[in-house]
Image (spheres, rainbow, N blue to C red):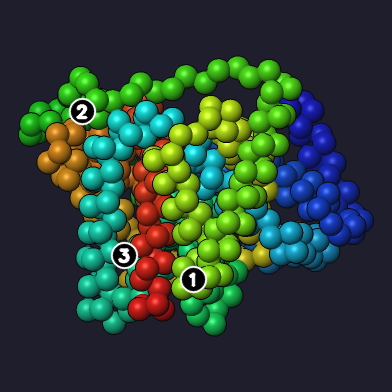
Amino acid sequence: MSLRWFLPIALAIIALSFWVAPPQGMMSGFAITMAIGGVLMLLGNTIPGLNRIGGGVILAILMPAVLFKYGLIPEHVATVVGDFYRLSSFGEFIVAALIVGSILGMDRSLLMAAGSRIILPIIGTIVLCFAIFGVIGQLTGYGVGRMMFYVVGPVLGGGIAAGAMPISELIAANTDQTAEAALTQLVPAVVVANLVCIGAAGTLAWVGRKRPNLFRNFNGEGNLTNVKAGFAKIPVGQKVDPSDAVRSTVIGLFLAGFLLMLANTLSSLMPAVHGYVFLILICALWKIFLPMPEFLVQSVDMWFRLVASAFIPAVIVAVSFVAIDIDQILTLINDPIYMISTIAVVIVALLAAGFIGWLVRLNFIESSISAGLGLADIGSSGDLAVLSAANRIELLPFLSISSRIGGGLVVLTLSALAPFFL
């Protein structure tokens, strides 16, 4: 919708929900969260300065909780949103769409060609970060499990919807803590790491300009590798007929539902493994080893794009109401070990991805940004903010691989570690 239509309608929804208690159910829940989320994303992505650090996502995850805490949002609004989120399993609905769409909808040739190189620094970065900070957690008395699940995991997990939310479910499944309580403790790491990623990207770009030849293959000026062959071009989106778009979206929803049910069934047979882990494995194996008709690729991609554009702001707002405790966030921000470790994870990820990528003939700066900062930022909006700061927007497909595939690997890793450290 154009702003001249969206803003009046969104503001009217907000005003009506504040004035009269809206009826419970999906329609009110969708309308309220989409309106508040859309307005906050618009504000955050428009305000100068804030728009360069993923401000839309930051406002959407923090502002509803802040306003509700200080009595600026009526209790009945929070109740309607909370009931909608819990009773409809809205978070599961979003995460399933993101996992299925991001993996199955990715261009296979790009995944195979780029993945053969970029996957090495991604895996190496994940392994090094978990190992280094697990040891730090043990030595400082902070705890190995707490360091890995509440700091390293959310930083490298690919954002809130696709990273922190599944991780909170893993924590809830292995402890007596609720997913909502766990999520409150994960959000500060995600937000702080995103800010550090943007600053680090700008710093790398500045160093690249000042010392472009610091060492061999240090600065590729936007090229991940100097090797001409072996990488697919960025796929160019094609216009889709409206009737085909509707058909594709419905098929994508249907397929995501089937795969989630299959994953949850496997999880019920093997309770130690979370359903999201099976979902990631099923999608990855299907994409790599089995033929997939083009109409299914288009369908899951269309469904992913719909959810990412329309419902991620909504689910982030819902999470803010349901799971974000501002007092606890302030306590965590004032915890020096937590904050220093969060910042340090980003720096270690950047350096590890850069040097491991350099060893497999990738350019240091581009590998640092693609595999390191792509893992540690807040997801799609974080990718764009990081690349804008680095002036390397052409690396977007590779950051997408890091966020999607790398984030999935982080969840898989934590699932394997949960029985031993939680």
Instruction: Determine whether label 3 and label 2 are within 8 Å by CB.
Output: no
Identified at 18% across, 33% down, the residue is 363
- Would you say residue 50 is visible in this rendering? no
Q: Is residue 334 left or right of residue 229?
A: right
Q: Amino acid at mark 3?
A: Ser
Residue at 68% from the left image edge and 18% from the top image edge: 241
Quarter of the image that includes the C terminus? bottom left
**Circles 1 and 3: CB atoms closer than 8 Å:** no
On the image, which quarter does residue 189 sit in? bottom left
- Indicate which disc residue 399 carries: none
Q: Which mark is residue 341?
A: 3
Relative depth, front residue between 29 and 96:
96
Please tell me how crowded label 2 is: few (under 14), some (14-19), or many (20+) other residues with Cα within 10 Å.
many
Q: Going 60% across and 17% down the picture, which residue do you hit? A: 239
Earlier along the polypeptide chain: callout 3 or callout 2?
A: 2
Q: Which residue is mark 1?
A: 270
Residue at mark 2 = 225
